[in-house]
Amino acid sequence: MVGIEEVAQRAGVSPSTVSRALRGRSGVSDRTRQRIAELAAELDYSISRSASGLATGRTFCIGVVVPFVWRWFFGQIIGGAEQVLRAAGYDLMLYTAGDEEARERFFRELPVRGRVDAVLVLSMDLTEQEADRLRGLDLPLGLVGHEAEGFSSVHIDDRLGTKLAVQHLINLGHRDIAIIQGLEPKPLGAIAPIVRREAFLRTLYDNDIEPRPEWMVPGEFSISGGERAMDRLLAESHQPTAVFAYADELAMGALRSLRRHGRSAPEHMSIVGFDDHEMSEYVDLTTVAQPVRAQGAAAAQLLIDQLVAGSRQNTVVPVPIELVVRGSTAPPRKTAEL
Amino acid sequence: MVGIEEVAQRAGVSPSTVSRALRGRSGVSDRTRQRIAELAAELDYSISRSASGLATGRTFCIGVVVPFVWRWFFGQIIGGAEQVLRAAGYDLMLYTAGDEEARERFFRELPVRGRVDAVLVLSMDLTEQEADRLRGLDLPLGLVGHEAEGFSSVHIDDRLGTKLAVQHLINLGHRDIAIIQGLEPKPLGAIAPIVRREAFLRTLYDNDIEPRPEWMVPGEFSISGGERAMDRLLAESHQPTAVFAYADELAMGALRSLRRHGRSAPEHMSIVGFDDHEMSEYVDLTTVAQPVRAQGAAAAQLLIDQLVAGSRQNTVVPVPIELVVRGSTAPPRKTAEL
DNA sequence: CTGAAAGCGCTAACAT
DNA sequence: ATGTTAGCGCTTTCAG
């Protein structure tokens, strides 16, 4: 492992000059800089991040915290963020805090501390205590999914999205509407489930519809979670004519359950999801579309901007959404028709 | 940011003792160790990774290189690896090298150098030159997907998997069989596409079936890639009765194309995929199932083992696969029936 | 434009 | 069982 000293010797200059040259600092003649660059490449020199980090306090590394890596939504966001970070010369440290234990541990030990120059939190509903812990890091902080004091953020309007979806069902004539809530077994994870649940209720109230508790079923955030949720709905004596699912993956599970029970959407039940998953078009699911990769990229960019400017000016970027009407929603049939 | 010195002073001991105590080294009395631990927690002390790394040469960080984060398959593998790494006290640095430029840059700059204690490469077909570059790091190296000199690896038998899939079609009576190859536009990415392609041809030959070049279509690794591939097959004058798709996501795209053309599987065409994606059951796709998360976890464990043992003993772990027959494959109908 | 020297916060080898 | 000392490899004043 060749160090800066060796490059310096071969170039006949001091380590300081090599350091300056390689990092593009001023105060090095073009000829010297050129020579050093060539020599460094030739010797396959690479800086020791530890040493550089120790000397400067900067790691050129960003911590990204997600509840899961293995959901489509997060893969997309991480991908978007990675691209921006890489382009800016930053590496990405991935932390998952999906279950209670991992999460508690993450915020207690704060493994990012001293390892990263900024932290990006993806779609996690931080408790005030957790947010405080992060603020204590005194680093640029980013958030995708909602807003929080001390964080730059990128987010859609979950309330509006939910309203678009539910009002669409109501406009089609549905009044017996269920929700698959996407709440984790424990109150972990995203804040979106809570917001969407409230907006669901609000939209119902605004249309003089009384919600039914038995039609508000939780669904673990996965396809099979949606499936189980729909199983429960179908086990009810009185059944809804439409379902709003917290996320497309839950909606797909619901479709699967429906089919397993010999029914289908929208004939027996209308279903609307949220996200516009890449499979949603295939299964012909009506949904609320949001740009996903782009949100990851935008959030990463906000962090990079702060890092480059050396400022701590937080910014909030609203992201547009859109109702995409496909074949899984239709007016309710009268019971007699079925 | 409180450092080791402050903890030492408050505890009335030297920094070395604090260092020893906190890292569980022997040579510290239980009482002292206890006191130091409490103090460290109280002061919310956290070690400077840079300083520690500089002094020891160890980063407690593992580099994971993937072609994409946003594909189901990689999300799963990364998730599996992350869990094992975290449990062992290692952080995960994520590098994506999906396109030619990113890949070239990754192997040229080798950003992992000096940043990680080991490197895990997921499902990428490394050129000899790339592998050499990694070997030059002199770190434990892991590989998921195939074997390579100097790497510990975890992989399925792609040849066997392909044979299971194709032979299944042949056993059903198909002889006009196409393949959606999953080769990238450029010959980048996984080695699996090449192996599966060869195994596909071999199986055909073994059954005295002559492959047709126009039935070997490339498909970019995504659902829409599979869709376009099937579009091309359907544009041929003479069409196959069955298709083997390199991956389930390609197969799903193929199904989508089929449906868009007013046809369906297995009535007009049988389709078999590879991976057993979580959606595959829903779309009733016959496929070759492989454990995905488990492979990521196993590979990570091999690396951890080496790190713990301080050895460089590479291990190869074979992973079982299984043909899962679902509704997308059936005997070919005679043309007249259609 | 370049060099010398001090030090970032920790660990390891060597005392005691 | 604990303290002392000397770096790890870079960056950054401060001189020249």
Image (spheres, coloured by chain):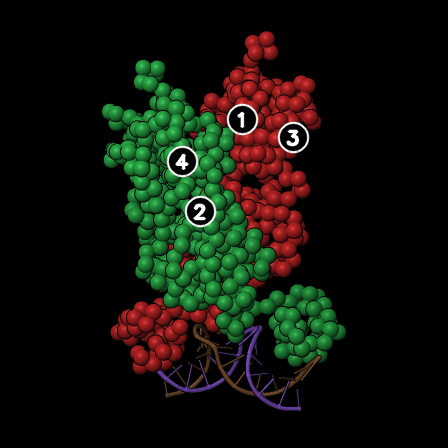
Chain colours: A red, B green, C purple, D brown
Residue A255: mark: 1
In space, the residues marked 4 and 1 are separated at their CA atoms by 28 Å
Residues under numbered marks 4 and 3 in contact, where contact means CB atoms less than 8 Å apart: no
Q: Is residue A256 above or below residue A145?
A: above
x, y (%) of residue C14? 57, 88
Disc 1 residue type (three-letter): Leu
Residue occupied by mark 4: B165
In space, the residues marked 1 and 3 are separated at their CA atoms by 15 Å
Residue A135 visible somewhere in the drawing: no
Parent chain of label 3: A
Q: Nearest the camera: B99 or B294?
A: B294
Residue B156: mark: 2
In space, the residues marked 1 and 2 are separated at their CA atoms by 32 Å
Instruction: Please tell me whether mark 4 or mark 1 is closer to you in this view.
Output: 4
* Residue at screen point 44% across, 50% down: B155
In the image: residue A39, left or right of residue B280? left
Q: Residues within 10 Å of mark 2 (few under 14, many from 20)?
A: some
Disc 4 residue type (three-letter): Ala
Residue occupied by mark 3: A217
Q: Residues within 10 Å of mark 4 (few under 14, many from 20)?
A: many
* Residue at screen point 58% across, 60% down: B89
Residues under numbered marks 4 and 1 in contact, where contact means CB atoms less than 8 Å apart: no
In the image: residue B81, left or right of residue A178? left
In the image: residue B327, left or right of residue A174? left
Of the residues under marks 4 and 2, which one precedes in the sequence?
2
Q: Is residue B235 above or below residue B122?
A: above
